[in-house]
Amino acid sequence: MSDGTSQEGAGAVVVEARGVVKEYRGGDGAVLRILDDVSIAVRRGEMVAVVGASGAGKSTFLHVLGALERPTRGDVWLAGSPIAGRDDDTLAALRNRAVGFVFQFHHLLREFSALENVMMPLRIGGHAPAEAAARATALLERVGLGARMHHRPGALSGGEQQRAAVARALAADPAVLLADEPSGNLDHANAERLHDLFATLARDLELGLVVVTHNRSLAQRADRTLLLEDGRLVDAPPEAGA
């Protein structure tokens, strides 16, 4: 992508970082560089896995890529729009429109049903109740929860809770789905079902999907596996996805 703006059609770049540096200042005043000249471009329908040691900065990378944090230097584009120069409100509007997030913990609101949880971002975004319910129902059916959508999170298994969280992340029809250790709390069977779901969603919904993971089975399903090490993002060695 030459200018960060070409977003039409299958295979178009939907999230891109160029020369991103992320630094923090420690309590002693020393500067800690977490990301060092990181660049990546992810296209529609592409699933990218990011692996690396604990503490390597993978979550920070995902937060910068999804505009939860601003880079110290460098540029990030979401769905063809730069995050640079935006105030907090317009950046939040872009993030809410373009990006869906899935974390290790589902963060579902326990007093609401799965359906209501998935409807919530749509209602906040101004969609009518009937429209939000129809969209949420379709997404819950897609992730295999059609028969469980009226259950509250406490009545759902861990795998069902996480699939409901995936449906919620997809509610606003984002161009990009970012997942941070999404199967980290699941048993093997539920993790494998979630892994299959991610691969299917990236292809069928033409999402750009970036997943941070320690799970080799999930990394195997990705189109590319990248290693974050010493602040740099490089092609992972074959054994990382083996």
Image (tube, rainbow, N blue to C red):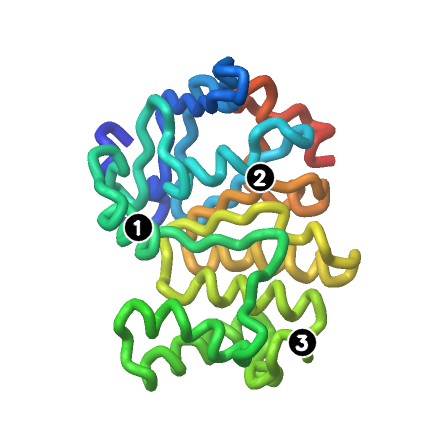
- Which residue has dot 3 on it? 154
Amino acid carrying mark 2 in the image: Ala
Q: Which residue is mark 1?
A: 92
Residue type at tag 3: Gly
State the residue position of label 2. Answer: 49
Q: In terms of secondary structure, where does tag 1 sit?
A: helix
Q: Does residue 108 sit above or below 155 in this rendering?
A: above
Toward which corner of the image does residue 222 lie, by quadrant? top right
State the residue lying farthest toward the top: 30
The residues bearing labels 1 and 3 have C-alpha atoms spaced at a distance of: 30 Å
Image quadrant assignment for residue 128: bottom left
Q: CA distance from mark 3 to mark 2?
A: 30 Å
Q: Earlier in the sequence, mark 3 or mark 2?
A: 2
> Taking 188 as reference, is 146 left or right?
left
Q: For the residue carrying disc 1, how many other residues have a C-alpha within 10 Å: few (<14), some (14-19), or many (20+)?
A: some
Q: Amino acid at mark 1?
A: Ala
Which quarter of the rendered picture does the N terminus lie within? Answer: top left
Callouts 1 and 2 close, C-beta under 8 Å = no
Quadrant in the picture for the C terminus: top right
Compute the Cα span from label 1 to label 2.
Answer: 25 Å
Residue at 54% in and 77% down = 114
Image quadrant where residue 230 sits: top right
Dot 2: what SS? strand
Q: Point out residue 60 in the picture as x, y percentages from the top left corner.
A: 51, 34
Please state the horizontal and vertical placement of residue 239, each as a whole percent of the image.
73, 29
Tell me which residue sits at (30%, 46%) in the image: 79
Instruction: Describe residue 26's horizontal placement relative to residue 148 as left or right.
Output: left
Q: Residues within 10 Å of mark 3 (few under 14, many from 20)?
A: some
**Label pair 3/2, CB-CB below 8 angstroms:** no
